[in-house]
Structures are given as structure tokens and as C-alpha cells.
Image (cartoon, rainbow, N blue to C red):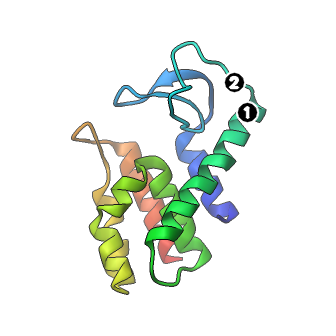
Amino acid sequence: MNQAGIDLIKQFEGCKLKAYQDIVGVWTVGYGATGADVTEGLEITQEEADKRLLADIEQFERGVSRVVKVPLTDNQLAALVSFTYNLGIGSLWRSTLLRLLNAGEYEQAAEQFPLWNKAGGKEVAGLTRRRLAEQQLFRS
């Protein structure tokens, strides 16, 4: 994961040191970290938020590397890790984006990013901006 990808995640996730419910009601803390330990009232330090971010990035990078069967540039990998960080590895596994990418159809795969801009079934402007930023990074 390169710095451009880390910066993209930080930009769109933001960092909140006190747990909050995201747009679909999932308890979240730091740079969008979720999990069984993230509950109402949880407060963490900036250092803990940074550690969670790096650990989560490593986890999602491993997941992306397991399912992508074609060579990737650093920016393509970073865009896919950001996508997966936000949506979960299952979304990538089941996606047309991955199917096209593994078929070597890089540009058609890139066209799939903006389609993933909904939360709770509704388009979200912030997700549209994020998917376009990921698409741009993937293409660069």
C-alpha cells in the first residue's frame, strides 16, 4: 500500500477518536475501524487510531492480493485496498470489478468504481467522491 492510498483512506474516512455510528448504523472509531470491540462509549488515542489503520490496511491488502490474479501497479493496488477498506473484502470478491480485472480488462474494471456509491440503498455524495478518487488513482 503506497502513501497515495493511505492518504485517500484518511481523507475519506476522517479520524474520530470517540466511537460513532456510521451512515448505516455500524459503530466505528478512528479511521473507519469497525469490529466487535468498537461499541458505544469507546474512546481511543490518536496512536491507537494510527495502529488500527495500518493493521486494517495490511488485512485488506492481503485480501486483495489473494483474489486479484493479474499484475497491478502500486496505484491500482492502493485503489483496490481503499475500495475494500470501505466496503469489505466480500464486496470485492463478488464484484464485476474483480471479474473484469482478472480477465485483464483493466479499463472496464476501472469503470465499475463509481457504481459502488450507495449506503443503505441510497446514493451518498461522499461515496461518489470516494469512488471517483479511487478510480482516478487506479487509472494513474
Assign a secondary structure to mark 1.
helix
For image coordinates 57% across by 50% down, the residue present is 9
Dot 1 amino acid type: Glu
For image coordinates 26% across by 36% down, the residue present is 120
For image coordinates 37% across by 25% down, the residue present is 25
Assign a secondary structure to mark 2.
loop
Residue sitting nearer the eye, 8 or 84:
84
Q: Quadrant of the N terminus?
A: bottom right
Q: Quadrant of residue 6?
A: bottom right
128 left or right of 17?
Answer: left
Q: Which residue is mark 1?
A: 48
Question: Mark 1 and 2 residues: CB-CB less than 8 Å, in contact?
Answer: yes
Q: Is residue 137 visible?
A: no
Q: Residues within 10 Å of mark 2 (few under 14, many from 20)?
A: some
Query: Please, which residue is most extreme toward the top here?
Result: 41
Which percent across, then down, holds residue 104? 37, 87
Which percent across, then down, holds residue 139? 48, 76
Q: Residues within 10 Å of mark 1 (few under 14, many from 20)?
A: few
CA separation, marks 1 and 2?
6 Å
Q: Is residue 72 above or below residue 34?
A: below
Which percent across, then down, holds residue 34? 51, 34
